[in-house]
Amino acid sequence: MSAAATPPPSFPAFPLAAPITIYFDFCPHLPNQAGTWGAVFYAGPADHHRVGGLLPAHTASEDGALNELLRLIHALNLPAAQLYTDHPNLVARRAAELPAPFTLATCHPTHPGHRQALEEAQRQQEPYTTVHRWGQRQHGAGQHVPPQPTGELQCRYRLVSQALYLDLCISGLPDTLRLGRQHAPGQFSVDAQETQTALHHHLLRIYGPALAPHLPRLEELIWKDFQHRQTELTRHPCTAWATPPGVQKILLRAGVITPDQTFQCRRAGRTNLRLSYGSCQTIRTLTRPQRDWAHIVRQLMRDAGATDHDLLQFQDLYTQQVLDLLQEPQA
C-alpha cells in the first residue's frame, strides 16, 4: 500500500463566519514622491478581490495605504476585518487605533496574500506612469505645469452677501462649509452644534477615518481660529489662507501628512516674519530692503534635510507663499 501523497501548500481555511481578511501594501516610485497602494480582500482561499489606488505625495507611505484602506472599509460598511501588513512599525503605531472587531497584525513578506497585495500596488502604477510620460512630452513642447501643493490643511473665512463661509484646502483641493450669517458688523450668528457636525463630515471626507480619533481637538482648534479671526472679517470680506495653530501637530500625529512637507510662514509682530519647515524655523526682519526670500527658503529647507527633489518641487511654491503673505494687509 503506497504512502499517501503530501497535499500541496494552500491558504489556511477561512470559516464562512470569520471576518474578511485583508492584505495590503504600498509602492513608491511615482513622480513627485507619489505612490500607489494595493490590497487583497479574502472571504476564502478561492474567493478574493484586488483593489488599490493612487497615494499623493503627502500620503505616500504605509500610513497612507492604511488610511485609504480604512476609508474604503468605511465606505463599504464592513462590520469586521483582519488587516495584515509586512511593516511591523506600522502595526506598533496604529494597531491600537482600530476599533474592535477590526485588527491589524504583521505577516511574512512572502505570504501569498501579501505578495498579491504588492503586485496590485505595482500594477496600479502602470496608468499613472503612462500619463506621466504624456506630461513629459508636454514639458518638452514648452507647456508649463505648476508645482504640486503640499498636504497641509489651510483655512480661510469669507463673507458673501452676509453669508459666512469656511473654505478648507488640502493639496490644492478646496472644500466649502457654510457657517452662518453676519447680522451686524463683527456680529455673527453661528449654530455651534450644527457647524461642528458639518465640519466633522467635511474633515472625514478630506482625510478619511484615520483622523477620527483626533477630530474633537481638531474641530476645537478650527473653531478657536474662527473666533480669533472675526476681527479680520470686519475689515476684509475674505481672510488670508492660513493653517490654524496646533492643526499641523494633529495631522502629523494622525499620520495623514509627513513632517518634511510642512511649511508655514506667518508674521511675528509688525516687523518680523517667522518661517518654519519640518523641525527648523527662522525669524527674519522685514525692515531690511530687498530680501532674497528664495535663498532664505532654500536655506531653511536645506537645514531641515530637504533633498534636491524637495527643493525642485516645492521651493518656488513656498517662496510664492512668502511673497503673497507680504502683500496682504496687516490686521
Image: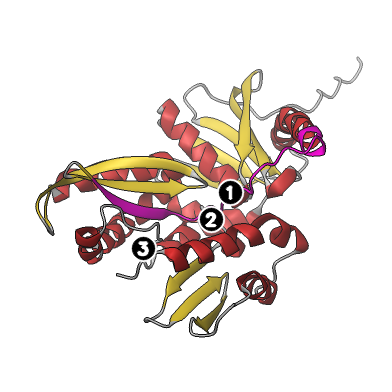
Residue most extreme to the left = 184
Say whether residue 177 is left or right of residue 267. left
Dot placed on the residue nearer the N-terminal end, 3 or 1: 1
Disc 1 element: helix
Q: What stretch is highlighted in magenta?
A: 137-159
Q: Is residue 80 visible?
A: no
Say whether residue 49 is left or right of residue 193. right
What colouring style does the render use?
A: secondary structure
Disc 3 element: loop
Crowding at mark 3 (Cα within 10 Å: few <14, some 14-19, many 20+): some
Indicate whether residue 92 is drawn in magenta: no
Task: Locate residue 308, reporting x and y percent.
Answer: 77, 62
Residue at 74%, 26% (x, y): give it. Answer: 10
* Mark 2 lies on residue: 257
* Mark 1 lies on residue: 59
Q: Quadrant of the C terminus?
A: bottom left
Q: Is residue 75 above or below residue 255?
A: above
Residue at 65%, 22% (x, y): give it. Answer: 45
Name the mark nearer the viewer: 3 or 1. 3
Q: Is residue 271 above or below residue 264?
A: below
In depth, the one of 184 and 164 nearer the eye is 184
Amino acid on which the number 2 mark rests in the picture: Ile
Crowding at mark 2 (Cα within 10 Å: few <14, some 14-19, many 20+): many
Indicate whether residue 154 is drawn in magenta: yes
* Mark 3 lies on residue: 244
In depth, the one of 96 and 154 nearer the eye is 154
Name the mark nearer the viewer: 3 or 2. 3
Query: Mark 1 to mark 2: distance in Å?
Result: 6 Å
Amino acid on which the number 3 mark rests in the picture: Pro
Task: Locate residue 187, reporting x and y percent.
Answer: 10, 57
Which of the 4 quarters of the picture holds residue 108? top right
Q: In this view, does 149 lie above or below 319?
A: above
